[in-house]
Amino acid sequence: MDGNDVTSDQVIAGLLDMGFDILDITQAIKAVGASLDNAIEFILNSSHRNDRNESTSSMCPTDNKVTRKRATSSFKPPAKLRQQNITEQLKLSSAPKRIKMKGVYDASVSNTNFLTCGKEPIVPSTVETGLDLCQEIGMVPSYCKKDEKMFGLDWERNANDLLQKNFGYSSLKGFQKEVLAAWMANQDCLVLAATGSGKSLCFQIPALVSGKVVVVISPLISLMHDQCLKLGKLGISACFLGSGQLDKSVENKAMNGAYSIIYVCPETILRLMKPLQSLAETRGIALFAIDEVHCVSKWGHDFRPDYRRLSILRRSFSAEHLKCLKFDIPLMALTATATIRVREDILKSLCMSKETHIITTSFFRPNLRFSVKHSRTSVSSYEKDFSELIKLYTKDKTALKKLVLKNLDGGSKNSSCTLNGGTSGLDEMRRNMNDSDDSDDDGFQDSPEEKLSVQYLEDDYDRVQGADDLDVFCGESCGRSSLEFRSCGTSDSNNMASKAGKRPALNQRHLEEGPTIVYVPTRKQTLSLTKFLISVGVKAAAYNAKLPKSHLRQVHGQFHADELQVVVATIAFGMGIDKSNVRRIIHYGWPQSLEAYYQEAGRAGRDGELADCVLYANLSRIPTLLPSQRSEEQTKQAYQMLSDCFRYGMKTFCCRAKMLVEYFGEEFSTGRCNLCDVCTNGPPEIQDLKVEATLLLQLIATYYANKTSQGEFSNDVEALKLIENPNIRAFVRMIREENHKYAASDFTWWCGLARILEERGFIIEGDGMKHVQIKFPEPTESGLQFLKSESEESFLVYPEADMLLSTETCKSYSSFSEWGKGWADPEIRRQRLQRRRGSRRKPRSRKPNLSTVRGRLSAKLTK
Ligand SMILES: Nc1ncnc2c1ncn2[C@@H]1O[C@H](COP(=O)(O)OP(=O)(O)OP(=O)(O)O)[C@@H](O)[C@H]1O
Ligand SMILES: [Mg+2]
């Protein structure tokens, strides 16, 4: 027991929850007692040491006594992390020297004063209140509003000056200008712009231009923190408020106008209405920006109920309500992933004005190469699926060696960090890693830069987040070489890239540089895949919301510093990550929605250079929803989104980029990207499936005709009586039994055909529910017409991925070839399964029963 009165049971439950192995947990608790932090440190450190100690089998718990002993004896509890506020943090960073106020690093004061008021900056000696501050620095208080007095007529030039001076960019992008113009006109604004297009600047610039405070509502602490840190380095004062902000003085300072930009989570802003109203009266509030605003909508992929309550902003900061205002404080809502339905919901839910300016850019990202591959996505397929990646990252041993040496040299002691920092196979590198071992054992040692002010990572379950992300061409955020094919973004400009097969000259070489993010569905998989990658010499790290914050912080830091080759993450490492050179996004398992998929894929290639987005999914299995609390309505919506995602993976004839872009309601005028797997490999051979389509449809139609007209089944369809539950499986079983020709046909093949029939409008889902794949097919009027038509017309279709998978003779898919011949034959399959059942001892339950496990472990520990 540690001082926190935590029981072994609680520690075990916590560790299991994080995805650790039972054996690791047992070892850890034996070694360090019932302390969650220490146990985590122990496991993570020991896995790293195992890796360095030669073995490529770090996935297996070692029974090497020496190793175990060493791991135990070298363990030291983690150093206590001091919580800092963001201002302290910023002081530590290498930002240029700016004006310092008492306790607050607030460079924006100089910016605004200097640039907008045309006076020399005055250094305030103290900061008592926001009003004091305004008066002291000669800032124009809010009641002057945005007007010519403050900005002059040439606001655009002013804004560009500020952009150059503060951010180092030459000019605003087209859509950014539009957004700023709307804000200048005191209009509400909905910004739908691709990931990486530069939405953040739309709300950051107003703080500089106006000298007032910008309040940004953001869903993730990690995101807020990242942005504050970046702004701090640029000399712009910013803070964030939320559950993670432990320094209560920050909130007071913020409400007194000490920061130019306040990031706040929706939960927190709801209780800050009064102080914010005071702030509006004193220093002034330029705008409320609601970032990742798709979180407002139940129809989006990351619904956050508190976002819905943000309608209070319109009421509380209207000119009618707050007498000091001449006009309502504008709302600026931003997202990269909102379907048409979500957009409408946003406008309504936030009570945005009828004149809201809606600014969109194309979602198409011409430098992203999408592809879908079949895989079981299990531990057994790691070796095959990641062989290319491993080769890529371990082939340049010199580079890797340098990387390791840099880490060791840099004092950040990254190599000590648990599940990150793999080594190459080189002995020398191993030595290096081992050399650093002793000094590393105190765990997560952070460089001052990495010491962040608060617990900035969501202590939440790994939510399905998403914002889709599409990137529009927007020039400057992209690398030079891609400028030629990027336009400056309106929604009809998506065709620049691939007109008439003309591809931008994307540089293949760049694919070999830059990190990879692998998204896996579960926390456990982040750990197992990371272990695997480390064991073969890749510098990889795991990231899931339940891992210790110090670890996550370190992974963040290392990732941004290019010290990691691969981050294996859940969706917790998604929204807002802004790193220019991510070359590869791998989804290892079905995402829960196309919004989430596109949002995560959009982390890649933000420099405009070629980047790969590969989805590995088990194409022969229907994906399932990850557990989450959902209402009935939300469940339906979640199934719809999962189904859309599944269909995206199954399609074999449609350009992937087109499917994605059109999913978000944008017309993809070019028709194809010329880069994705479908565009480059071409569709499969078209097939006439008239016979099969008729057979399936006939069966379904007969069943329903008999059922509805007579209540009972006639003798003609005696066999149909067998179908108590008219689901697709039963229909397929009947086809197999009744038709010798199809006796050995595969169920998944018929599922594919049923999907096609559904898309053509010949069948619909019969139980009124939403399923990922049609389950209870019912004929439609068009379906019946199709059956009645006497014409000889063929029924031409491109077989879908699962159909191809089940019929290919020479299977290129790993899992399928493993099945061996014969499985397609129902009789052989039945016999084999029977044999298997007989020989099976005890089925291993997928989820360990927590109480049994705890009991077992507790018993062991007390021995
Ligand atoms: N006018 C500009 N010129 C050059 N670069 C810019 C400009 N505006 C923004 N950028 C850069 O573009 C990158 C992406 O910006 P940002 O993080 O705001 O994207 P985003 O649209 O919010 O993406 P996401 O939806 O993924 O959050 C940043 O590194 C930013 O500095
Ligand atoms: Mg953003």
Image (spheres, helix red, strand yellow):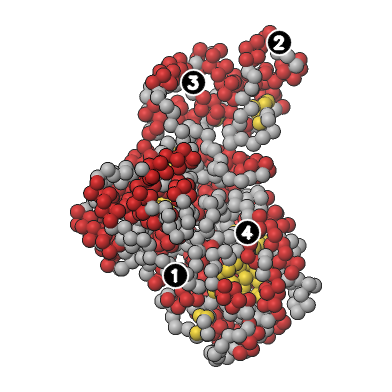
In x, y percent, where is residue 119?
57, 91
Query: What residue is at 36 percent from the left and 37 percent from the top?
Result: 380
To which residue does mark 2 refer?
714
Foreground mark, 3 or 1, reads 1
Q: Quadrant of the N terminus?
A: bottom left
Q: Is residue 556 left or right of residue 702?
A: left
Residue type, numbered disc 1: Arg
* Dot 4 alpha-carbon crowd within 10 angstroms: few under 14, some 14 to 19, many 20 or more: many
Find out whether the residues at labels 2 and 4 contact each other: C-beta distance under 8 Å.
Answer: no
Query: What residue is at 58 percent from the left and 57 percent from the top?
Result: 336
To which residue does mark 3 refer?
745
Residue type, numbered disc 2: Ser
Foreground mark, 1 or 2, reads 1
In x, y percent, where is residue 636?
65, 41
Q: Under tag 3, what secondary structure?
A: loop
Q: Quadrant of the C terminus?
A: top left
To which residue does mark 4 refer?
293
Q: CA distance from mark 3 to mark 1?
A: 63 Å
Residue 82 tag number:
1
Residue type, numbered disc 3: Ser
